[in-house]
Amino acid sequence: MSKLPASFRAYVVDRPDGGAFSRGLRALTLADLPPGEVTVRVEWSGVNFKEGLAAREDGRVARRYPLVPGSDLAGTVVASADDTFPEGSKVLAHGYDIGTSRHGGYADLARVPSGWTVALPDGLTTRDAMAIGTAGFTAMLAVMALEDHGLTPASGEVLVTGAAGGVGSAAIAILARRGYKTVASSGRPEARAYLESLGATTVIDRAPFADPAKRPLESERWAGCVDSVGGNTLTRVLAQTRYGGSAAAVGLAGGTKLEHTVIPFLLRGVNLLGIDSVMCPMPRRLAAWSRLQSDLPLQQLEAMTTEAGLADVPRIAQDIVAGQVRGRVVINVNR
């Protein structure tokens, strides 16, 4: 076993005994780490909507205190009780209970069960893996589900809502790489050039999707959709989906309610596909990471990624919940 430090730096949110909420950098010890077979010297983590909530007093994501947020992490194994992941190997982990009920990636060290650990795919650095992170992984799962239900580039236009966010950006890049005609829906006019650079064929304003539907079926347009907004947006998307088309629901930035009728499902055979990246079974998880190596071009990944340090997390958390973060933010844990 490598010699591990007696203490290490971590970004911690806390509410002791239900008292005042606090957040900031702290020194933790090895005894603070949860049980698990694989101890990782974390090099990079990422910021998702979940991290934005975890860093807020009213976020209602943290299921224990104190907590190190960061549901994504990648780095080097420094201690292992599983020969599958020997010391010195590069790994990543995300989802499950990481960063919500057990300490996550916003720390110099993390410990995770080996059953949650993925060997770093060939051709990716640990920074690349976190630039992809849960957002890119979720986008890949959504595209896989749409294709499992018959979507091909010949099917017609594919809509991506919340297009300038992490999931939306990755979905556009993946779909464009696979030859789809992709329509990006965004409320940020200044993001047009960025979305077109990722491969969006058309960029449209999100405003029409905010209006309540007047009828259960509207003019057919979308062969498929990756929807990270939910709420009324998803209601309108379903009403506009073409016969036999599918919508993959990946987020809830616009709300959790879905007020609709069953008419699109009965009269047009529309499929509503739920995408879960948290508890995704390992075989599907590995298949998605394998496809990400070829389906998400690294130059596109770099174009959608910005870098920050642990001390920047409170500001970025506020921005991502407010919908002000474009693409992906990776956290350099060594900064």
Image: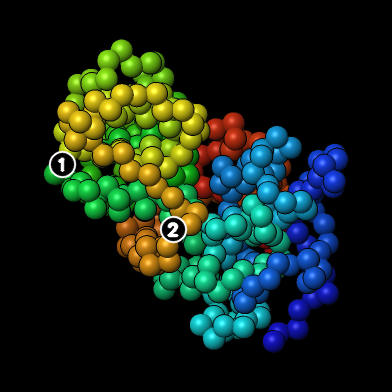
Residue at the (44%, 33%) spot, across then down: 229
In what quadrant of the picture does the N terminus appear? bottom right
In what quadrant of the picture does the C terminus appear? bottom right
Q: Are marks 2 and 1 in contact (CB under 8 Å)?
A: no
In the figure, is residue 246 to the left or right of 186? left
Kind of element beneath mark 1? helix
Kind of element beneath mark 2? loop
Above or below: residue 273 compared with residue 102: above
Q: Which residue is mark 2?
A: 280
**Which residue, as the protein is rendered here, is positioned at the far left?**
154
Q: Which of 227 and 149 lies nearest the eye of the viewer? A: 149
Q: Which residue is mark 1?
A: 155
Q: From the top left corner, tell me how far across and down residue 124 is, in percent.
A: 45, 68
Spatial distance from mark 2 to mark 1, Cα to Cα? 27 Å
Above or below: residue 85 compared with residue 109: below
Q: Quadrant of residue 22?
A: top right
Q: Which of 182 and 60 lies nearest the eye of the viewer? A: 60
Residue at the (18%, 48%) spot, across then down: 150
Q: Quadrant of residue 10?
A: bottom right
Residue 253 visible: yes
Above or below: residue 153 compared with residue 156: below
**Amino acid marked by disc 1:** Ser
Circle number at residue 258: none
Q: Which of 16 and 208 lies nearest the eye of the viewer? A: 16
In the figure, is residue 21 to the left or right of 1? right
| 2 or 1: tag closer to the N-terminus | 1
